[in-house]
Amino acid sequence: MGTIPICFPAPKEILVNRDTSTFSDTSSPLISSDRVEGTKVFDGSGNSIGTIKRLMIEKTSGQVAYAVSAFGGFLGMGDQERPIPWDQLTYDTRLGGYRTGLTEAQLREAPISTQDDNWTNRDRERELHDYYGAAYYWEDEE
């Protein structure tokens, strides 16, 4: 199986293999969002640093823009949430989760996310992408 990008920047050896022939656990390269939610997020060393709580999907294109990661709580209580640009994550089949080049300390310092976030504010999204050094997913739209 391959790996999908979650890196900051992604080391070449762990970048996702997007060849669909490497997906042996499914007949499709697609996955439902409810199977992604709850999936662990690992740092570049393979240490678990959180889980994916929800996905943020751009309405018009259908492209996943962010994975909101929860970390730091105990049994789901006291979790802190941080949105991670989707292109900063890579699925790692060996770990059974998404890998990123971020450390837990970097994630702690990242812009906070809440259920009440107003995702129509491009300045907020720019701040978020600039923090991660990620490309703006909407640049092709403007």
Image: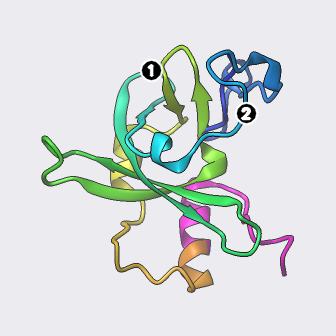
State yes or no: discs 1 and 2 in contact (Cβ < 8 Å).
no
Residue under label 2, please give it: 29
Residue ID at (61%, 63%): 129
Badge 1: how crowded within 10 Å, few (<14), some, or many (20+)? some
Residue 41 position, x and y percent, is: 43, 35
Quarter of the view holding residue 127: bottom right
> Dot 2 lies on which element?
loop
Is the C terminus in the top left, top right, bottom left or bottom right quadrant? bottom right
Give amino acid for label 1.
Answer: Gly
User: Counting residues from the N terminus, which is met first, the one under dot 1 or under dot 2?
Assistant: 2
Q: Does residue 81 appear to the left or right of 34 in the view shown? A: left
Front label number (1 vs 2): 2
In the rendered image, the vertical position of residue 33 relative to residue 117, given as above or below: above
Tag shown at residue 46: 1
Determine the CA span between mark 1 and mark 2. Answer: 23 Å
Residue 130 position, x and y percent, is: 61, 64
Q: Which stretch appears magenta?
A: 126-142
In the rendered image, the vertical position of residue 69 relative to residue 31, given as above or below: below
Give amino acid for label 2.
Answer: Pro
Observer-nearest of 59 and 110: 59
> Dot 1 lies on which element?
loop
